[in-house]
Image: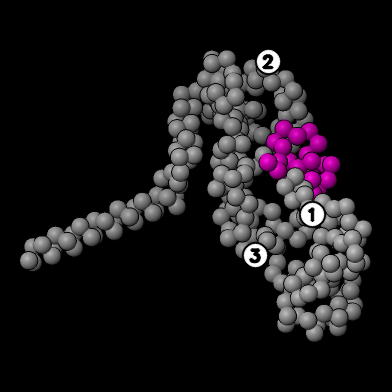
């Protein structure tokens, strides 16, 4: 009986140890969380056999992308890797020799950042951390990619965003069409862009807001700009935020009320 008990304790400890190792590897990124992640791992292993060919070779087939890239923020920011020789297109798409030897083709022997955001995270490490916050766009879950909002080749991209100069909000409006309007009365914050109120990669606050409750509104509606704000809203603060206390519910814009109440 004692032997059986010791054996059971030993098996339990072994199971706990295995689970701890697997759990640790999962959070460290060592164990794929899905088949999609496994495909990414296989892709990386496959491309390790490839060598760098230089972005001039890319130009022979991708003339349009090459010209746009030469005018983009990414091109101006890249630094040639003296160890690997990576430069230009291959800093993001990986070494291109296998891709070239196979005659090109979509996804053939080349890294596609649209399917593998880890390439973006190589430089943008802070964004990967933001995507791990409680409220975030589902990039790590594979439901969308960085390129859904950003154009890495864009020649008219705003500095450090890779979103178009056509408008700060255009990337958001592609999905959030109901927030586009037009509205007869538009919240002035929209003129500065969605990022005035939202942390677009991830946030600890619901709806990816950059601040909680009234603290968000007070960023603009402080005493200096709205001297009657405290007296007007003070009685309602206990009931909720400005938009959830039954007042300014149309926070993006309204066609019925100049105070964004409906």
Instruction: Identify the mark nearer the N-term, 3 or 1.
Output: 1
Kindly report the distance in space between the C-alpha atoms of the residues bearing marks 2 and 3: 47 Å
Near mark 1 (Cα within 10 A), the count class, few <14, some 14-19 or many ≥20, is some
Q: Decide: is 183 above or below 122.
A: below
The answer to which of 58 and 135 lies nearer the viewer is 135
* Residue appearing at x 72%, y 58% in the figure: 198
Instruction: Tell me the chief SS of the magenta region.
Output: loop
Please tell me the numbered disc located at residue 248: none
Q: Are marks 1 and 2 in contact (CB under 8 Å)?
A: no
Residue 149 visible to an observer of this rendering: yes
**Would you name the residue on which mark 1 appears?**
179
- Mark 1 or mark 2: which is in front? 1
Provide the residue designation for mark 3: 205
Residue 199 position, x and y percent, is 69, 57
Q: Tell which circle, 2 or 3, labels the residue nearer the N-terminal end.
A: 2
* In the image, residue 146 above or below residue 72: below
The magenta segment is 148-170
Q: Secondary structure at mark 3?
A: loop
Mark 2: which secondary structure? Answer: loop
The foreground one among 161 and 116 is 116
Residue 26 location, x and y as percent? 42, 50
- Visible residue check, residue 125: no
Quadrant assignment, res 167: top right
Circle 2 residue? 60
Count numbered badges in the picture: 3
Instruction: Reply yes or no: does residue 161 show up in magenta.
Output: yes
Q: Position of residue 245 (x, y in %)?
A: 76, 76
Q: Does 225 sit left or right of 215 as displayed?
A: right
238 horizontally vs 45: left or right: right
Mark 1 / mark 2, whichever is N-terminal = 2
The N terminus: image quadrant: bottom left
């Amino acid at each position: 009986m004692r032997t059986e008990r010791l054996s059971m304790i030993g098996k339990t400890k072994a199971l706990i140890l295995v689970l701890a190792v697997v759990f640790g590897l999962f959070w460290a990124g060592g164990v794929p969380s899905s088949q999609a992640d496994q495909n990414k791992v296989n892709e990386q292993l496959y491309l390790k056999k490839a060598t760098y060919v230089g972005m001039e070779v890319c130009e022979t087939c991708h003339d349009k992308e090459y010209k746009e890239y030469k005018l983009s923020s990414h091109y101006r920011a890249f630094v040639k890797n003296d160890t690997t020789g990576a430069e230009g297109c291959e800093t993001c798409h990986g070494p291109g020799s296998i891709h070239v030897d196979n005659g090109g083709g979509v996804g053939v022997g080349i890294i596609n950042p649209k399917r593998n955001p880890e390439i973006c995270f190589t430089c943008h490490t802070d964004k990967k951390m933001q995507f791990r916050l409680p409220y975030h766009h589902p990039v790590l879950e594979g439901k969308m990619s960085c390129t859904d909002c950003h154009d890495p080749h864009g020649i008219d991209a705003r500095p450090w965003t890779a979103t178009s100069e056509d408008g700060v909000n255009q990337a958001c409006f592609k999905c959030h069409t109901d927030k586009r309007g037009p509205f007869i009365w538009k919240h002035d914050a929209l003129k500065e862009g969605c990022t005035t109120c939202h942390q677009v990669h991830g946030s600890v606050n619901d709806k990816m807001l950059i601040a909680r409750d009234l603290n968000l509104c007070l960023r603009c509606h402080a005493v200096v700009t709205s001297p009657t704000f405290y007296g007007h809203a003070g009685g309602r603060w206990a009931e909720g935020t400005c938009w959830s206390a039954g007042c300014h519910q149309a926070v993006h814009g309204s066609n019925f009320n100049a105070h964004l109440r409906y």
